[in-house]
């Protein structure tokens, strides 16, 4: 082969290898940094993590401080957020994907939802403060925080649910109509069960984002130091991110150890949620394959 044809090929191979190295570095460097940060958190906080830490109230003495109110506050917050956001988000996705006409209004709503999914969380906190805390008079309650978090994750649930519904083949819908099924029967008995694993995955990922958010809760008015347990949706509350932020801001190094232990609890909760979603998705897909 002539030399003038070999040179461009060799140059392209060099560029290809450089591009591969850059992409590999872009993956490895953040992973190494993440491993270092997680390792530091685990080494610092694992010795503080015990049953007394999980079942005690916050205290001005680091050795006596615990995260029980924060755990219950986060649990109530996530539960109410799911109850509010999941039915609304999935219903909106079903309407847009199965019922709505593809007109100008449809595309405006679609673009709006996509833009809302990328809005910074602090903006939702300001919206929640204006509407739920002040206008509706909910004050610094769990319900106000849950409504604010619902606004935060609602666009994500709608987008992921629509993608899951859109992934169901059109031929399945046509087959249902050919057998005499109504649109609702087709959606309820065929489309939703088929799209359920992907809908569930998106919903749990959205809920996991809500667990780790701090800025909206600060603006809505979550309490950073609380010595009682919330008993109703209208009770004042704190959450794990707020408790972690409070301890990190303290000058005593012992509170930093408490914050590391609380971070471990928060990360474990998020990993469990992701594991549950993967397990349910695996079981549903396995049952479907057995059919």
Image (cartoon, grey):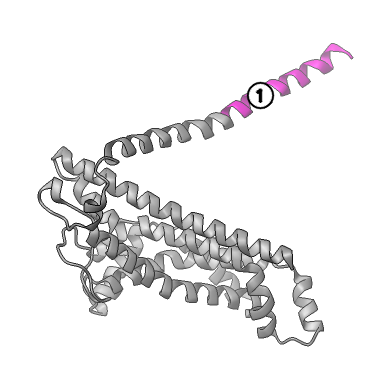
Q: Quadrant of the C terminus?
A: bottom right
Asked if residue 2 is among those painted magenta in the image, a careful observer would answer yes
Where is 26 relative to 90, above or below?
above
Q: At 40% from the left edge and 64% from the top edge, which residue is drawn?
A: 152
Where is 9 relative to 213, above or below?
above
Q: At 19% from the left edge and 62% from the top edge, which residue is drawn?
A: 223
Q: Quadrant of the N terminus?
A: top right
Q: At 46% from the left edge and 58% from the top edge, which residue is drawn?
A: 273
Q: Is residue 119 visible?
A: no
On the image, the x and y values in percent for residue 135 come to 26, 78
Q: Is residue 185 visible?
A: yes
Residue in the foreground of this view, choosing between 112 and 199: 199
| Pointer 1 residue | 17
Q: Is residue 190 left or right of residue 271?
A: right
Could you say whether the residue bearing mark 1 is in a helix, strand or loop? Answer: helix
Locate residue 72: give its quadrant: bottom left
On the image, the x and y values in percent for residue 112 come to 50, 67
On the image, the x and y values in percent for residue 111 come to 54, 65
Where is 116 relative to 24, above or below?
below
Identify the residue at the far front of this view.
51
Q: How many marks?
A: 1
Q: At 33% from the left edge and 39% from the top edge, which residue is drawn?
A: 42
Magenta portion: prevailing SS class: helix
Identify the residue at the far top of this view.
3
Residue in the foreground of this view, choosing between 18 and 242: 242
In the image, which residues are magenta?
1-22
């Amino acid at each position: 082969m002539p030399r003038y044809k070999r040179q461009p090929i060799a140059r392209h191979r060099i560029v290809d290898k450089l591009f591969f190295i850059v992409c590999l570095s872009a993956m490895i460097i953040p992973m190494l940094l993440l491993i270092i940060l997680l390792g530091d958190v685990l080494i610092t906080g694992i010795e503080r993590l015990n049953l007394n830490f999980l079942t005690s109230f916050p205290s001005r003495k680091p050795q006596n401080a615990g995260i029980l109110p924060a755990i219950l506050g986060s649990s109530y917050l996530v539960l109410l957020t799911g109850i509010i956001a999941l039915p609304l988000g999935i219903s909106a996705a079903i309407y847009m994907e199965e019922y709505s006409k593809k007109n100008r209004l449809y595309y405006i709503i679609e673009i709006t939802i996509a833009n809302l999914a990328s809005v910074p969380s602090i903006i939702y906190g300001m919206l929640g403060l204006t509407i739920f805390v002040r206008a509706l008079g909910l004050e610094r309650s769990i319900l106000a925080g849950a409504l604010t978090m619902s606004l935060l994750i609602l666009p994500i649930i709608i987008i992921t649910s629509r993608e899951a519904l859109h992934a169901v083949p059109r031929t399945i819908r046509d087959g249902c109509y050919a057998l005499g099924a109504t649109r609702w029967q087709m959606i309820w008995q065929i489309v939703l069960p088929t799209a359920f694993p992907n809908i569930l995955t998106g919903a749990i990922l959205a809920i996991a984002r809500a667990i780790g958010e701090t800025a909206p809760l600060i603006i809505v008015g979550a309490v950073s130091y609380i010595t009682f347990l919330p008993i109703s949706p209208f009770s004042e509350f704190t959450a794990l991110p707020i408790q972690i932020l409070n301890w990190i801001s303290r000058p005593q190094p012992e509170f930093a150890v408490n914050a590391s232990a609380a971070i471990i609890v928060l990360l474990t909760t998020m990993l469990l949620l992701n594991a549950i979603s993967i397990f349910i998705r695996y079981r549903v897909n396995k049952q479907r394959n057995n059919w």
